[in-house]
Amino acid sequence: MPTIVVEVMPKAELLDPAGKAVATTLGKQGRSHFSGVRIGKRFELTVDEVTDAVLAEARELADELLSNGVIEDVVSVRVAE
Amino acid sequence: MPTIVVEVMPKAELLDPAGKAVATTLGKQGRSHFSGVRIGKRFELTVDEVTDAVLAEARELADELLSNGVIEDVVSVRVAE
């Protein structure tokens, strides 16, 4: 069955304490290539078929139900390969 | 600065109670196109430059630090466009 992937990240201007904790751990491990970490969400929506209407509904869901517009941005709504 | 995106999902054979709750809500709202929802994580790692070595280290991190191999699969490690 086809899958629509929705990706949501915390807004750039907000702190992300969990991401910060991972970044601090990486620094302590001497992994100096990685200067920042942010943690968001990835939703897989299983659908019967992918049509323009279903994709439009998925975009609506992403904005209204799957993300909190005050603190998060929807960065991608796409059909999984 | 370039960003490496790591995507992690709960293993297919495991229950995902949060995803199930979203799917139930969608059903109650009459959104019948969506038969299943699973919720995973999306990490953005900021790096100074993308080299084969950095990408290899990101893959290692994805397996060892960013995911729990018992319950999660790393589905993607890629450079963000």
Image (spheres, coloured by chain):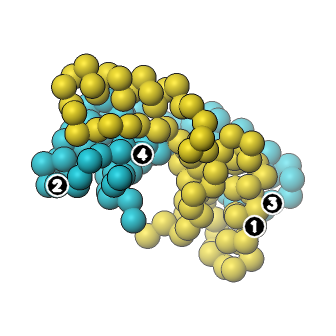
Chain colours: A cyan, B yellow
Q: Is residue A30 above or below residue B26?
A: below
Where in the figure is residue B55, as x and y percent of width and height?
67, 71
* Nearer to us: label 3 or label 4: 4
Q: In this rendering, do the residues under marks 1 and 3 share a single chain?
A: no
Q: In this rendering, do the residues under marks 4 and 1 share a single chain?
A: no
Query: Which residue extends farthest right?
Result: A29
Of callouts 2 and 4, the N-terminal one: 4
Q: Are marks 2 and 4 in contact (CB under 8 Å)?
A: no
Mark 3, other Cα within 10 Å: few <14 / some 14–19 / many ≥20: some
Any part of residue A9 in sight: no
Q: Which residue is mark 4?
A: A44
Of callouts 3 and 4, the N-terminal one: 3
Q: Which residue is mark 1?
A: B57
Q: Which residue is mark 2?
A: A51
Where in the figure is residue A69, as x and y percent of width and height?
32, 33
Front position in the image: A27 or A42: A42
